[in-house]
Image (cartoon, rainbow, N blue to C red):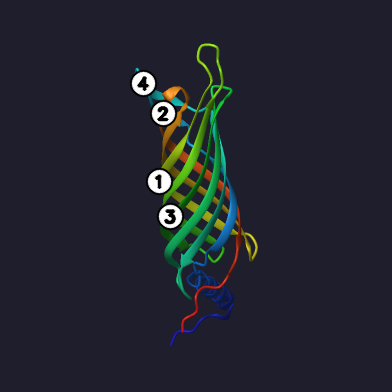
Amino acid sequence: MPSVRPSRLPGLLIAACATSQLGAAELVVRDIGLGLQMQPSDFSYTVESPSVTTSGSDGFDSGYGIVVRGLYSFTGAGDRHGFLAGLGLGYAQYAYDQSGELVTYGIDGGGGYGFAVTDQLHLSAMARLGLGVAHLELPDSGAFPAFSADGASLSYGVEFGIGYQITERLVIGADLGYRQDNYVLAGTHDIDVTLDNTGFVGTLSVCWRLAVTPWRLE
């Protein structure tokens, strides 16, 4: 019967321990956090007035936002992957042509799937749908009078994320996604504006983990 030489035993024990730890990874996400978001800038538009309708494409100079989000994993003890659900509130501001701006407030929700690479590191894929309100402000430029419009927004998209647990409760995260925002705005001078804002969106967040243990089997 073959035997293991003593000199090899410590290495085998370390390898067995590492394999055991890798296999024991559990997906436990019970997070609430604050994030800084880079918004998509390119948009197409349609402007309707009593006398004429025009359309075209343009882009914002910049777009940034702040989001407060919660993320929850529907996983039990020993589950390394499972379904995720998220809910968030957001504020975004877009700069246009030096002095114009679009300001939005909204709520969004989503669902997806997560996978625990280790107990500290998880990956996620989410689909999101959001509703909001928006205000567009364009000051007097000399060639055109001041204009403002208010209305509603609908957003939808997908995002892929990574989260790392740097302490038992503190988690840092990064998400990259692709989103479309549709705005329907009613403005001054009987002018209505429709904007379709599409592109990549990135989020950096800091989260607090409300619980660190999964559901227990009964």
Instruction: Report the Cα–Cα distance between label 1 and label 3.
Output: 10 Å
Q: Is residue 18 above or below residue 104?
A: below
The residue carrying mark 3 is: 110
Question: Which mark lies nearer to you, 2 or 4?
Answer: 4
Q: Where residue 25 sits: x, y (%)?
A: 50, 69
- Mark 4 lies on a secondary structure that is loop
- Answer with left or right where residue 59 lies relative to residue 13: left
Instruction: Report the Cα–Cα distance between label 1 and label 4.
Output: 34 Å
- Mark 3 lies on a secondary structure that is strand
Question: Which mark lies nearer to you, 3 or 2?
Answer: 2
Label 2 Cα neighbours within 10 Å, binned few <14 / some 14-19 / many ≥20: many
Q: Residue 24: which numbered mark, if any?
A: none
Q: Quadrant of residue 163?
A: bottom right
Instruction: Report the Cα–Cα distance between label 2 and label 4.
Output: 12 Å
The residue carrying mark 1 is: 157
The residue carrying mark 4 is: 50
Q: Residue 193: which numbered mark, if any?
A: 2
